[in-house]
Each structure stands twice: as C-alpha cells, then as structure tokens.
Image (cartoon, rainbow, N blue to C red):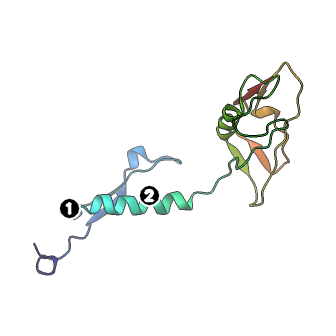
Amino acid sequence: MDLRKKGFQMPEKIHFEEETLTDTYGKLIAEPLERGYGTTLGGALRRVLLNSIEGAAATGVRIAGAVHEFATIEGVKEDVVEIALNIKSLKFRMEGNSEKTAIVKATGPKDITGADLQVDASLAVMNPGQHVLTL
C-alpha cells in the first residue's frame, strides 16, 4: 500500500527491558515498526553503538628473532601466529589516548602470561592469567 495514503507507522513504545539490563547488556524494545524496518533500524543502531565503544587492544607485535608472521622461534613452543592470537586475547584498561608499549623479557623454561607484561602505570592487563607463550 502507498505510504502517503496509509501514513507511516511510528513506534509508540521505546524502552529498555529492565529485567535483563546490566552494565554490559541492554535490550532495547521499539514497537510497533513497519514491516522490514526492524532490520534496518537494528543494523544502523548496532553500527552507531559499536563505533562509540572506547577501549584498548593490542595493535601490533614485534618479536625478536621472528622475520615473518609464519616463523617459528627457537625455544618457544608456539609459532608467531599462535602468539599473536594469544596477545589479541589480552584485555587492557588504559588511561589516556596515546599509544602504549608493553614489553616481555624472560628466560625459560617458563609459561609467559599477561602478568609478565611490563607496562606503565596508565596501562593495566585485566586478564593477567591469559597464556601468551611457553619458553
């Protein structure tokens, strides 16, 4: 049917579901919507929310002795790809917006975890038990 004749159905009720609302999760309910508009609005809202999230993550890795990403390192159980994936699993809390550097210096045999990263006071590893590599 022609929307000019029928009129556009605006949502009458927009609210958060109180029972499931937490610091990290919320269910937004908007009803009723025109057919097909739920997907359109949901996709746009998801993009806006994801672009608004602030956070810190590892953006690069430099490993002494590794010439490329598929290299193996003598004395290290994991290859460079597996080490990089383990580093990506680390969770950080950071004050400020400038780039930070974390360093690991160790001799083996040893299991290196997030707790072994040397970081300044403005950067904290939130999951210090996360495995990084094995010497």
Residue type at numbered disc 2: Arg
- Name the residue located 81 percent from the left edge and 22 percent from the top edge: 135
Q: Is residue 37 above or below residue 59?
A: below
- Name the residue located 36 percent from the left edge and 58 percent from the top edge: 42
Side (left or right) of 14 relative to 8: right
Q: Are marks 1 and 2 in contact (CB under 8 Å)?
A: no
- Name the residue located 66 percent from the left edge and 40 percent from the top edge: 88
Q: Secondary structure at mark 2?
A: helix
Give the x, y percent position of residue 47.
Answer: 46, 60
Q: Secondary structure at mark 1?
A: loop
The residue that disc 2 covers is 46
Residue type at numbered disc 1: Arg
The disc at residue 35 is 1
The reply to whether residue 18 is visible in this rendering is yes
- Name the residue located 79 percent from the left edge and 28 percent from the top edge: 73
Side (left or right) of 7 relative to 85: left
Side (left or right) of 48 relative to 57: left
Q: Residue 117 versus residue 16: which sits nearer the camera?
A: 117
Q: Is residue 20 above or below residue 41?
A: above
Q: Is residue 86 above or below residue 21?
A: above
The reply to whether residue 30 is visible in this rendering is no
Q: Residue furthest bottom?
A: 4
Give the x, y percent position of residue 35.
Answer: 20, 61
Tell me which numbered mark, 1 or 2, is placed earlier along the sequence. 1
Give the x, y percent position of residue 45.
Answer: 42, 61
Corner quadrant of residue 71: top right
Give the x, y percent position of residue 81.
Answer: 67, 35
Q: Residue 14 versus residue 70: which sits nearer the camera?
A: 70
Corner quadrant of residue 15: bottom left
